[in-house]
Amino acid sequence: MKAKLYHGAAFYPELWSEETLEQDFKLMKATGINVVRIGEFAWSTIEPREGEIDVSFFVRIIERLHELGIDIVMCTPTPTPPIWLSHGHPERMYVNERGETMSHGSRQHMCTNNDVFREKSAIITEHIARSVGKLPGLIGWQLDNEFKAHVSECMCCTCLKLWHRWLEQRYVTIDRLNDAWGTDIWSERYNCFDQVPQPAATPFLHNSSLRTMYQLFSMEMIAEFADEQAAIIRKHSAAPITHNSSIAFHVDNERLFAALDFASYDTYASQANYAAYMINCDLWRTVKKGRPYWLMETSPSFSGSLESYSIPHPDGYLRSEAVAAYALGAESFCYWLWRGQRAGSEQPHGSVISAWGKPGIGYRNVLAVEEARRKLEPIILSTEPVQAQVAMTYSDRTKAFLRTEPHRKLNYRGLLTGMYELLLKLGIHRDLIMEGAPLDGYKVLVTPFLHHISDEYRARAQSFAANGGIWIIGPLSGGRTKEHTFHTDAALGKLEELAGIETEFMYPIDGTGSIGHAFGLSAPLSLWSTVFTIKEAEAVGTISGGHADGLSFLTERKYGQGKIVMLGSMPAGEEGAELLSKLFSHYAEQAGVTVRSGVTPGTIVAPRRGAEGTVWIAVNMDGKGGSVDLPEPAYDLLSGDAVPRGLLHVPAYGYRALLLK
């Protein structure tokens, strides 16, 4: 890719006349759009009838865009299989857990594991890659669109056969599966792999292992589909490959991106929930470490469909989103979509330009993004993001565990975002990292809501602590095996000996009158909890009241040069947020965390480093304005002014770029 910051949009030239396209090209140049994403829903345009494949339209579009200086990300059109592939073939269609077979229409209506679908997908992908793969202006590829956004695990006959094969590869013998899953409970023991059902409709609840393993199986299958498409493209094109994913979809992003070249994602978080926007920046920056990430899709104003719509962004917020993304490591900031759609299910969705060719309600904010991009581009390109010293682990596999066992409708994304927001408000620079990510350079590792902690993860985190790091574990972490069963040697398995504690009880602590006390603060405790007696650790947080009066919910143990901290229960409410904030501040100070800033809540700092020193890009995200406490005099890279140390005001939705002296 070229050395520039990209400002782009999803573009559907197949839907419009030549006259409209020329109008679009002129408007794109005027708006500052320098990259577009095309082709993702165009299968029927390229192959209207089986075997009649013609990519020439998109060849001409790419050539015209390149003439105008607009770069292109080409997509494979596989999320929308055409009618000739689905009509009269219910066996090819997606089947949900209620046994309902999807009909043609919308998207993702076909099973991506079906042999015929895979064959036809490979054929059209190869035609497209061969036709456009070496064209000038083509800078990247996007596979499909939002894998598993509208569907989860398919329950069709094809998937059933693949499921049995996957189980046999994993367990080898049916006796091993029965033993691992505990299938003697409720007489679920199987005599062969072909008898193991899919977790479709059942009178009560499926075995936890069955449901969780089926999710992991589905995640592996969609990743294999991505691998297959990427391999085809690489035969004909050297341009890097990505997929526009999300933490909301039913995929294992760590596995999905293993064979891809750069990370990209879609998000529609509102201004009122800016932490949900920020968590994406801090996650996707680390997925393909060393390469910038792309924000492939967000709304210029509001999202919408035939059934719903969201509130338009306040003026100024879109620019804050873009500046924060670029500053935290994004190479692109792109919209869905360029020109609003005149038909279909997403007619009400916000766009840069309306279906009738006038600027949309977010247009002036798009212009503000472009102005900021131009100002920041030389600063961003001459610096790079500073690695955080605090890491919080993210896990799509844990998301599968919590879908199987949500307790009282717990949502992994919501739980994690709530805890992440505390670090955000404290001004602690943070990385969200996948389970398999290296821990080099970190001083504090936070492992919350990780039902199953693998032997491999535990060994790396153990080594991290032994070498001087502080490992904070919990809540809801370590209480399940990889098969989604309880440990039988100890409630938290090998973690207990490691942490120097013994679990006395594991139970839902909500509503029992249990109060946690730590760091001179008190808060009610909540969630499924583990409470401890001390073996070789120190009690940092104790409980009063309820069933666990006098026991510990927070412990620490010196381990090598570092510490292992166990958080067995979730402090709740405003008091709980204050206690957790104190916990993070306490251990950040103990670990010597220096990559942090004094900011008011609602304002963030993205630290970057270049040849001239450290640059702080401060952005106000909540629209209330805020301040950042400069530890030393600085130079304003945008105005050229000298800035004294101390409090610096950041206006509502404003930003500052500061070179610390």
Image (spheres, grey):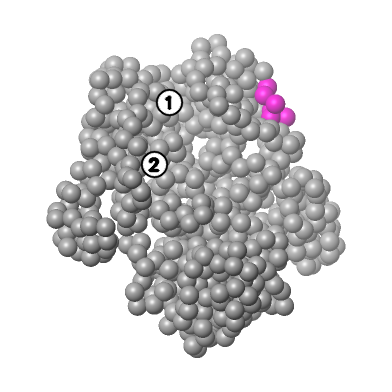
Task: Please report the residue visible at 79 percent of the width from the left and 67 percent of the height from the top.
Answer: 632
In the picture of the structure, the residue carrying the numbered disc 2 is 152
Secondary structure under badge 2? Answer: loop
Magenta region: which residues?
Answer: 359-364
Q: How crowded is the residue under tag 2: few (<14 C-alpha within 10 Å), some, or many (20+)?
A: some
- Picture coordinates of residue 4, whole percent (x, y): 58, 42
> Residue 599 lies in what quarter of the image?
bottom right
Left or right position of 97 against 118: right
Position of the C terminus, as image quadrant, is bottom right
Q: Which mark is residue 302?
A: none
Secondary structure under badge 1? Answer: loop
Task: Choose the circle earlier in sequence order: 1 or 2.
Answer: 1
Q: CA distance from mark 1 to mark 2?
A: 15 Å
Query: Is residue 335 something one can see in this rendering?
Result: yes
Amino acid at pointer 1: Ser
Task: Please report the residue visible at 73 percent of the width from the left and 54 percent of the height from the top.
Answer: 603
In the picture of the structure, the residue carrying the numbered disc 1 is 106
Task: Please report the residue visible at 26 percent of the width from the left and 26 percent of the height from the top.
Answer: 90
Amino acid at pointer 2: Ser
Residue situated in front as seen by the camera: 235 or 631 = 631
Residue situated in front as seen by the camera: 250 or 445 = 250
Residue situated in front as seen by the camera: 369 or 43 = 43
- Picture coordinates of residue 328, whole percent (x, y): 61, 53
- Picture coordinates of residue 261, whole percent (x, y): 42, 48
